[in-house]
Amino acid sequence: MLKMKVLVTGGAGFIGSELVRQLYNLKYKVSVLDSLVTGKKENIPPGVTFYHGDICNKEFVFNCFSQERPDIIFHLAAQVSVPYSVRNTVTDSEVNIVGTLNILDAAVKFRPKKIIFASSAAVYGTPEYLPVDENHPVEPLAGYGVSKYGAELYIRLYSKLYGLDYTILRYANVYGPGQLPDSEAGVVAIFINSLLTGITPTIFGDGEQTRDFVFVKDVAVGNILAMEKGKNLTLNIGTGQSTSIRELYFFIARELGVEIEPKYEVRRKQDILHSYLDISEAQKYLKWMPIYNLQVGLKETIYFFRPAAIYRREKVRII
Ligand SMILES: NC(=O)c1ccc[n+]([C@@H]2O[C@H](COP(=O)([O-])OP(=O)(O)OC[C@H]3O[C@@H](n4cnc5c(N)ncnc54)[C@H](O)[C@@H]3O)[C@@H](O)[C@H]2O)c1
C-alpha cells in the first residue's frame, strides 16, 4: 500500500526533526519546509525532500505545496522564544500568525487531509486550577502565547470556512536530545550544558516552581497518532506530572556525578509558579500516553549532550 505524503514545517528543528525521523522510519514519504533560522540541515535524514525557505514567503510556500501535494501537514515552524516575543511582538506575530496563514491558504488550495499544529501550554497563562485542561481560560503572558493562540483561532476559522480538518496539540515543556537552550523547556539543556562545562547554573526563585516536562519522542508519537485519530480537536500533550526545578536540577547533577550548588536569584515576574497539564483528552482521542518517565528521558538527553560539551571544553582549553 502506498504510504501518505507528509510535509513537516520546522522539520529541521528540535521537535520537528524527531517527528521527521519517526515518520521516515515508518516509511512515509516525508518532506521538510524550514528556513534553518534555528533548525539544522544535518537534522534532516537523507531521502527526505528539503525546501529551504520562509513560511512568511507565500510564493515559496505555494510552490512547495504544489510540488509535494502533501496528504498531511505538520505545522511546527515558528518563532519559539518567549523572551524574544516580548521584545519583538511584530516579528513574532509575522512568523507565528501570518506564516501560519500562508500555510492555511496553501492548504485551502491543495487540500491536504489534515493539518496538525504545534501549539503550546503557553496559551493558558497563569493556571487558575491544576491540572490545566483544554477548557482552562486562555490568558497568555507573552506575545508568543498570543501568537500561538491567534494561529489556533485561524486554524479553527479555516476549518469552518473551508472544511479543513485539523488537530491542535498544546505541548507542555518538551525536552530531549538536540533541544536549544532558548526553547520553552530550555532549562533542561541549560542545566546539562552548564554542569558539563563547570558553570554554576542559576535558579530563579527557590526552585520549588513546578513544570510538566514531556520527552520529545513521546511528543512525536502523539503527532503521528493525530494523523488518523480525532478530528478538529484541541488536545494537551504533556505527562500530567509536575516536577520542581530543584528536583530537575539535582537529578541532572546526580546523573552527571557533579556536586555544584546552583545560584538562586529573585524570581522573575513573568514566571508561573506551578503548572502541569491534564492529558486525559489526548489519552481518550489519540489513545496516546507518554512512555518515557523523566529519569529515562533525562538520561537519554544527557547522553546526547555529553560528547558535545566535552568537545567544547577541550576547545576552550586549547584557546
Ligand atoms: N520546545 C518546547 O518546549 C515547545 C513547547 C510548546 C510548543 N512548542 C512548539 O513546537 C514547535 C517546534 O519547536 P522546537 O522546540 O522544536 O523549536 P525549534 O526552534 O527547534 O524548531 C522550530 C523550527 O522552525 C524553523 N523556523 C522558524 N521560523 C521559520 C520560518 N519563518 N519559516 C520556516 N521555518 C522556520 C526553525 O528553523 C526550526 O527548524 C514550535 O511551533 C513551538 O512553538 C515547543
Image (cartoon, helix red, strand yellow):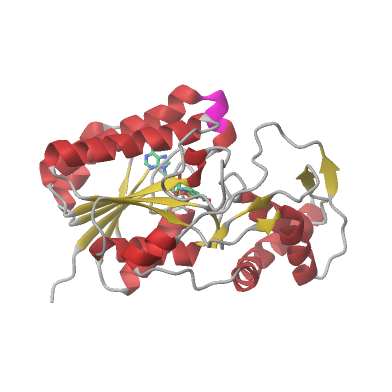
Q: Residue at x 49, y 33 (%)?
A: 139
Magenta stretch: dominant SS? helix
Single out the residue that lies furthest toward the front: 129
Question: Can residue 224 be seen?
Answer: no
How many badges with numbers are in the image? 0
Q: Nearer the viewer, residue 289 or 82?
A: 289
Report the front residue among 98 and 56.
98
Q: Is residue 239 visible?
A: yes
**Magenta region includes residue 69:** no
Which quadrant holds the N terminus?
bottom left
Q: Nearer the viewer, residue 51 or 111?
A: 111
Side of 61 relative to 19 (left or right): left
- State the image coordinates of residue 95 (x, y, percent, origin top left): 39, 33
Apparent side of residue 11 relative to residue 296 in the rendered image (left or right) = left
Residue interval drawn in magenta:
84-88
Q: Position of residue 132 (x, y in %)?
A: 51, 49
Q: Is residue 88 above or below residue 158?
A: above
Left or right of 142: which side holds 165? left
Q: Residue at x 78, y 53 (%)?
A: 316
Q: What residue is at 61 percent from the left and 74 percent from the top?
A: 296
- Measured as percent of width and height from the top left, residue 293 is found at 58, 71
